[in-house]
């Protein structure tokens, strides 16, 4: 290197967090002063660091101009010029470098006609932003795109009236073309709003340790290859999205800009994902750069793992979206906003998600949407640790919000969710809806509250198979995932096959849920209640309902089963059980409705919907191909419920106490196996065949062929106690014959 080039490089040296950077292309040399003078502390290839300051416009004809900060305090870079779109609504800037030291300000000059300002960083250095980004002169949305990576330090702030989006995508799509992160663009043609983001095979990372906030009702988005937020994110009544995109993919915005969809590359190529002339650093290498740890409090250890401020080690692979700070969309008026944390692997570590509002809770999606449906990309693994909380409450008068925690493979939930409703009137104040599910495996050891002044909300747990047990087995998963190795390894501990439980939950945890929520357990395959030591599964804390829904996809592969000697009871809440087959024990609802519905065999022991105090009793409904029950009771001191037992083939029951309610028994064969007067009530009794054309035989000893006749023997008729308001035998639309037997 000649002396003249060395002098030019020294004169162009850039101060950065106590370092000086000398540009000796193709390398950058880092100097630091100590008691012995200046020493070289690092030599890095260009495009291998995160740079905090200065902001340098790119000499690519975009026309971006920057007024360098003066000697005043605080130093401010005024960013002007740029190239507008044909309609003047979009303004484009291009930078060689974009970064800020603590105390510095990047001021994007706007005007009322500019809707969106889009700035790209083309030099290959990641942006280390530890100062203030603001927009002045207009309420423009601001988009910052740097494929090499973006790091917001602990002093990073926003002063943006519109929305803000930071991304490491290779291009931003418009209806008429693409704004490429590097290379040439036809800026005039890029009219309308941004609606897509193209990611190449390698995408840079985004790290936020700052306090990023936008105005009321606006959106705040971090969209990169790997995204970690340990700082504060705030969008009152608006939307926060933290999304990581693995590999070559196209991310689309919905028409209102609120939801994401992910399109996997077809033929290995995403439109708009032009190759950038550099390779972004992995997140651990990016964090190891000069000044990054000091600016963020986040480091990388010698194993290439990311270490958060509190010492928590988290995975750093592509497609990981991790939040350990706050994400706040709580509203000052109206309902709360929405929070989306999306990626291939999603984790909350000591995170505080707040989506409450005076008039109702907002919507929170962690790893996916309802049942894994909708447009947002689904996580394969989702982890919520025990220090994380999600609040989506009504704080004055309204219903609780909606919270979804989802993974296509495994979800481990150890945190807390609250979606409470509150109101002084009867029109609102119902608890919200919460779903926690891993489609293949769910580890649930957290708490959920969907209580409301005017009614409980719903908690839905819906993996493939469910085992309910009072043994120590249910607590074992908590230790397995204590160090979050689900996200770290990408595998599920003890991955089940179709016959093994993908959710094992303790009776104690399940019983406690009913105190604050209506509980829905839904499995694509089986739900099994293990033999219980005390023979009780009691949901007696409140009047919340419980639903067991096996064979949720109705492909005939899922059954519900429990020990016939065990009992499920509620304190007035309904009990609903469904599956391809049902084997139930004793069911008691204290006035709630009870239903068992199956296309196959339905078997139950004693069923009681009677109210044990002065209230009304519930209805009882049993359906199946063949239905068998012992004692069925729906009587009550105030008003009785109706009893409806329907079998497409054989119905068998020992005794029924209907009180003032109606009793309807349907089956091509009905077997009343109790003693005399074992079927009682003061309402109406209907006994009818399932098939309208079935012949009916009444009386006798029952020797008539049962596959031709619907038989009611003399003994069965004797089991009917006097006192019914009326008894009907046969169907109103029946067209078979009637035989009166006298043998």
Image: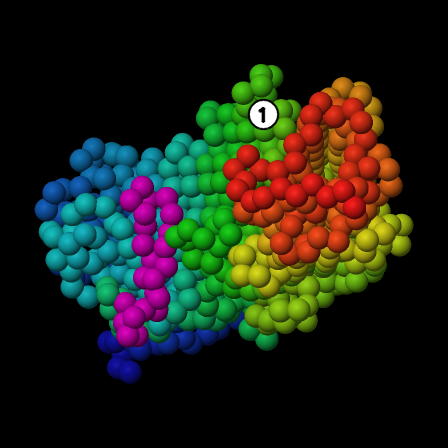
Q: Position of residue 122 (x, y in %)?
A: 27, 63
Q: Position of residue 181 (x, y in %)?
A: 26, 62
**Which of the pair 11/371 is nearer the observer?**
371
* In the rendered image, the vertical position of residue 390 relative to residue 603, given as above or below: above
Residue drawn at 75 percent across, 48 percent down: 671
Residue 218 visible in this rendered orientation of the protein: yes
Residue at image mark 1: 429
Q: Quadrant of the N terminus?
A: bottom left
**Which of the pair 231/595 is nearer the observer?**
595
Q: Secondary structure at mark 1?
A: loop
Q: Please, which residue is most extreme toward the top here?
A: 425
* In the rendered image, the vertical position of residue 22 relative to residue 208, given as above or below: below
Residue drawn at 46 percent across, 36 percent down: 337
Residue drawn at 61 percent across, 35 percent down: 457
Q: Quadrant of residue 7?
A: bottom left
Residue drawn at 75 percent across, 31 percent down: 658
Q: Please, which residue is most extreme toward the right here?
A: 534
Q: Position of residue 49 (x, y in %)?
A: 41, 68
**Which of the pair 291/632 is nearer the observer?**
632
Q: How is the image coloured?
A: rainbow
Instruction: Report the magenta residues as a range.
Output: 248-270
Left or right of residue 225, residue 255 in this image: left
Mark 1 residue crowding within 10 angstroms, few (<14) / some (14–19) / many (20+):
many
Q: Please, which residue is most extreme toward the bottom here?
A: 1
Left or right of residue 332, residue 135 in this image: left
Image label count = 1
Q: Residue 249 lies in magenta, yes or no?
A: yes
Q: Residue 567 lies in magenta, yes or no?
A: no
Residue 227 visible in this rendered orientation of the protein: no
Q: Quadrant of residue 15?
A: bottom left
């Amino acid at each position: 290197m000649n002396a003249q080039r060395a002098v030019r490089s020294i004169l162009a040296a850039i101060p950065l967090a106590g370092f000086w950077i000398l540009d000796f292309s193709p390398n950058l040399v880092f100097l630091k002063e100590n008691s012995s003078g200046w020493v070289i502390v690092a030599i890095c290839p260009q495009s291998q660091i995160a740079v905090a300051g200065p902001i340098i416009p790119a000499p690519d004809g975009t026309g971006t101009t920057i007024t360098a900060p003066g000697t005043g305090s605080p130093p401010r870079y005024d960013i002007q010029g740029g190239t507008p779109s044909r309609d003047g609504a979009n303004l484009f800037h291009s930078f060689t470098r974009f970064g800020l030291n603590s105390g510095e300000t990047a001021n994007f000059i706007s005007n009322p006609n500019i809707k969106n300002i889009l700035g790209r960083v083309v030099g290959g250095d990641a942006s280390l932003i530890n100062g203030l980004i603001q927009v002045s002169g207009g309420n423009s949305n601001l988009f910052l795109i740097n494929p090499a990576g973006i790091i917001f330090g602990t002093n990073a702030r926003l002063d943006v009236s519109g929305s803000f989006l930071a991304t490491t995508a290779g291009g931003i799509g418009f209806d008429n073309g693409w704004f490429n992160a590097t290379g040439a663009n036809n800026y005039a043609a890029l009219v309308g709003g941004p609606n897509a983001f193209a990611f190449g095979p390698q995408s840079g990372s985004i790290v936020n340790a700052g306090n990023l906030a936008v105005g009321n009702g606006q959106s705040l988005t971090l969209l990169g290859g790997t995204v970690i937020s340990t700082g504060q994110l705030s969008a009152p009544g608006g939307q926060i999205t933290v999304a990581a995109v693995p590999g070559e993919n196209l991310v689309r915005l919905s028409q209102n800009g609120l939801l994401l969809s992910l399109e996997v590359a077809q033929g290995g190529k995403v439109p708009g994902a032009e190759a950038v002339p550099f390779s972004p650093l992995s997140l651990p290498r990016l964090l190891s750069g000069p000044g990054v740890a000091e600016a963020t409090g986040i480091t990388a250890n010698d194993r290439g793992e990311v270490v958060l401020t509190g010492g928590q080690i988290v995975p750093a692979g592509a497609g990981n979206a991790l939040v350990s700070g706050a994400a706040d969309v709580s509203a000052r008026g109206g309902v709360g906003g929405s929070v989306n944390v999306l990626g291939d692997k999603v984790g909350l570590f000591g995170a505080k998600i707040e989506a409450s509002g005076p008039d109702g809770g907002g919507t929170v999606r962690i790893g996916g949407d309802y049942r894994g449906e909708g447009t947002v990309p689904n996580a394969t693994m989702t982890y919520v640790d025990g220090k994380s909380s999600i609040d989506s409450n009504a704080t004055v008068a309204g219903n609780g919000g909606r919270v979804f925690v989802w993974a296509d493979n495994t979800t481990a939930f150890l945190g807390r969710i609250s979606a409470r409703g509150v109101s002084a009137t009867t029109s609102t104040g119902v608890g919200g809806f919460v779903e926690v599910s891993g489609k293949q495996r769910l580890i649930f050891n957290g708490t959920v509250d969907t209580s409301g002044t005017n009614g409980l909300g719903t908690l839905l747990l819906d993996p493939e198979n469910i085992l309910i047990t009072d043994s120590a087995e249910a607590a074992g998963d908590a230790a397995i995932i204590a160090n979050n190795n689900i996200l770290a390894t990408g595998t599920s501990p003890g991955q089940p096959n179709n016959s093994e439980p993908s959710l094992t939950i303790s009776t104690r945890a399940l019983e406690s849920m009913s105190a604050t929520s209506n509980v829905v357990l839904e499995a694509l395959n089986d739900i099994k209640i293990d033999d219980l030591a005390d023979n009780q599964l009691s949901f007696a804390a409140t009047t919340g309902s419980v639903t067991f829904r096996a064979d949720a996809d109705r492909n005939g592969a899922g059954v519900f089963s429990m020990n016939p000697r065990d009992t499920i009871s509620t304190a007035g809440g309904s009990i609903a059980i469904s599956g391809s087959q049902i084997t139930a024990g004793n069911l008691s609802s204290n006035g709630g409705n009870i239903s068992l519905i199956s296309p196959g065999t339905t078997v139950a022991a004693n069923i009681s919907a009677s109210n044990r105090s002065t209230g009304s009793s519930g209805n009882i409904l049993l359906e199946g191909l063949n239905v068998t029950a012992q004692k069925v009771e729906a009587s009550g001191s105030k008003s009785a419920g109706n009893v409806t037992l329907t079998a497409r083939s054989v119905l068998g029951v020992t005794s029924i106490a209907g009180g003032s309610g109606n009793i309807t028994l349907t089956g091509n064969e009905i077997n009343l196996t109790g003693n005399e007067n074992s079927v009682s009530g003061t309402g109406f009794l209907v006994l009818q065949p399932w098939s309208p054309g079935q012949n009916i035989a009444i009386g006798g000893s029952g020797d008539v062929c049962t596959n031709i006749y619907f038989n009611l023997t003399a003994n069965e008729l004797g089991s009917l106690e006097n006192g019914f308001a009326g008894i009907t035998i046969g169907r109103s639309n029946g067209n078979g014959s009637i035989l009166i037997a006298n043998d």
